[in-house]
Amino acid sequence: MSYISNKKRSQRIRKKLKKINKKDRFRLTIFRSSRNISAQIIDDKSKKTLVSATSNKKGSTNKKKIERSVEVASILAKKALEKKITKVYLDRGSYKYHGRIKFFAEALRKEGLNF
């Protein structure tokens, strides 16, 4: 895929998400690189990051990418539940719901986040 088609897909998805956004939900964004994955929960009204987690740390390089994404999801979910955040909506950007993104989302659901 080209850069332009990824950008258009990302904009299209974000536009749809803004339509269905409810007042009690925060946006969960995901960034995926070739090695790492990071995610953050953002309050769009105040435009501030509430919780974030990443796989960019020592000791996680020995694990597979999917294992790292599941680990980051559980860390993020624990931090979110500590701040009493239970409802979010998933902003996957231009990434397809497949592979690491899918395992990340399933791990979040197992930990107790609703989206």
Image: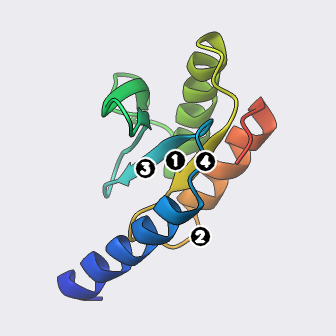
Q: Which mark is residue 30?
A: 3
**Residue 92 seen from this side:** yes
- What kind of residue is marked 2? His
Marks 3 and 2: in contact by CB < 8 Å? Answer: no
For marks 1 and 2 on the same chain, the one whose residue lies earlier in the sequence: 1
- Looking at marks 3 and 1 on the same chain, the residue that comes earlier in the sequence is marked by 3
Q: Report, in whole angstroms, how far the alpha carbon at label 3 lies from the one at label 1.
A: 18 Å
Does residue 20 appear to the left or right of 51 in the view shown? Answer: right
Q: Residue 100's x, y, as percent?
A: 55, 57
Residue sitting at x 47%, y 60%: 18
Pointer 1 residue: 64
Separation of marks 1 and 2 at Cα, in angstroms: 16 Å
Mark 3: which secondary structure?
Answer: strand
Please report the residue visible at 65 percent of the width from the left and 53 percent of the height from the top: 103
**x and y percent of residue 30 in the render?**
43, 49
Residue hosting label 4: 22
88 lies above or below 105:
above
